[in-house]
């Protein structure tokens, strides 16, 4: 008979993939995210290790990928919990379809990064459709909200409507279609959760990330921690209660 195992959740870890069109600001966003994560652990012993290195996650999942993985140690202010976020890049071309599926099998959620003016592009749609089919939890980030053309779209809710329509067209579940939307300007260093009016204000008045971190990428890190599930692991020790968390 097959050895029995329990599915357990691994505490303190989040595995998430970023889906973004090549020009939609991914590198800038990840850099800002790393800056916020670094601030969260400053003065503690955990050094920020900006190695886009997939070693640990690959070993754990038994899958080899060519994409980069950024390991981000993060301390959540609200809970005081220290976590590690593994942020995996997804390839920008559909001819890497095998790679896309391998990456998505390593993560529990995705951040869909979309230019607030241009909306989702073809390649983004392909990777998103695979992510939704895999049952992953999405977070949507509308980037470049500081651009004048973005303002009218935010005002009218046009981009959000298009996103919901896209999710429905790609066969998203009801829960997946009820995604959290964040509004950002990675270039200016701000992000806002679910409130386009604050985004419009920041876009109009400007934001000085050197003086305040009120709207820093910490909010995106928190959203990843709060929305994306802990990774599941098989545990072959049947004395453990089902679906309990353990320190991994």
Image: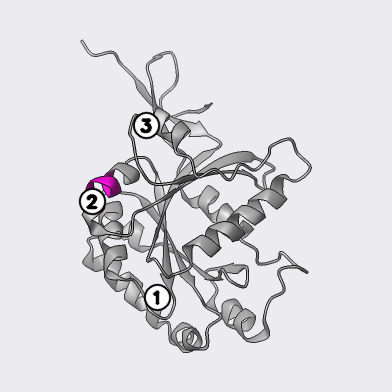
SS class, disc 3: helix
User: Which residue position holds label 3?
Assistant: 61
Q: The N terminus lies in which quarter of the figure?
A: top left
Structural distance between the alpha carbons of marks 3 and 1: 34 Å
Q: Work out whether 82 lies above or below 167.
A: above
Q: Nearer the viewer, mark 2 or mark 3?
A: 2
Of callouts 3 and 1, the N-terminal one: 3
| Colour scheme shown | one colour
Tell me if residue 77 can be seen.
no
Crowd tier of the residue under label 1, counting other residues whose Cα lies within 10 Å: few below 14, some 14–19, many 20 or above? some
* Residue occupying the far top of the picture: 1
Tag 2 near tag 3, CB within 8 Å:
no
Secondary structure mostly seen in the magenta stretch = helix
Q: Work out whether 225 lies above or below 151.
A: above
Residue 32 percent location from the top left of the image: 60, 60
SS class, disc 2: helix
Q: Nearer the viewer, mark 2 or mark 1?
A: 2
Residue 230 percent location from the top left of the image: 47, 39
Residue 196 percent location from the top left of the image: 53, 77
Q: Is residue 98 magenta?
A: yes
Q: Based on the displayed image, in which of its 4 quarters is residue 159 positioned?
A: bottom left
Q: Is 16 situated left or right of 208 in this image?
A: left
Structural distance between the alpha carbons of marks 2 and 1: 27 Å
Question: Tag on residue 160?
Answer: 1
Q: Is 25 situated left or right of 93 in this image?
A: right
Q: Is residue 134 magenta?
A: no
The magenta region covers: 96-101
Crowd tier of the residue under label 2, counting other residues whose Cα lies within 10 Å: few below 14, some 14–19, many 20 or above? some
């Amino acid at each position: 008979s097959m050895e029995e195992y329990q599915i357990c959740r691994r505490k303190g870890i989040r595995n998430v993939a970023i889906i973004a069109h090549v020009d939609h600001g991914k590198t800038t966003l990840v850099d800002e995210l790393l800056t916020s994560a670094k601030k969260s652990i400053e003065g503690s012993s955990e050094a920020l290790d900006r190695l886009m290195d997939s070693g640990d996650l690959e070993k754990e999942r038994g899958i080899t990928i060519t994409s980069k993985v950024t390991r981000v140690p993060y301390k959540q202010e609200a809970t005081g919990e220290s976590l590690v976020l593994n942020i995996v890049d997804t390839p920008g071309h559909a001819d890497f379809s095998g790679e896309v599926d391998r990456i998505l099998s390593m993560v529990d959620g995705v951040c869909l990064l979309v230019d607030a003016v241009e909306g989702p592009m073809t390649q983004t749609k392909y990777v998103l459709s695979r992510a939704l089919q895999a049952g992953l939890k999405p977070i949507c980030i509308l980037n470049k909200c500081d651009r004048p053309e973005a303002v009218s779209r935010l005002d009218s809710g046009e981009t959000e409507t298009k996103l919901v329509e896209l999710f429905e067209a790609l066969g998203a579940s009801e829960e997946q279609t009820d995604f959290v939307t964040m509004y950002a300007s990675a270039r200016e260093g701000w992000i806002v959760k679910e409130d386009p009016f604050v985004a419009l204000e920041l876009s109009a008045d400007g934001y000085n990330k050197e003086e305040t971190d009120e709207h820093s990428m910490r909010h995106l890190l928190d959203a990843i921690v709060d929305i994306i599930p802990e990774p599941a692991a098989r545990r072959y020790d049947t004395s453990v209660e089902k679906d309990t968390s353990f320190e991994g």
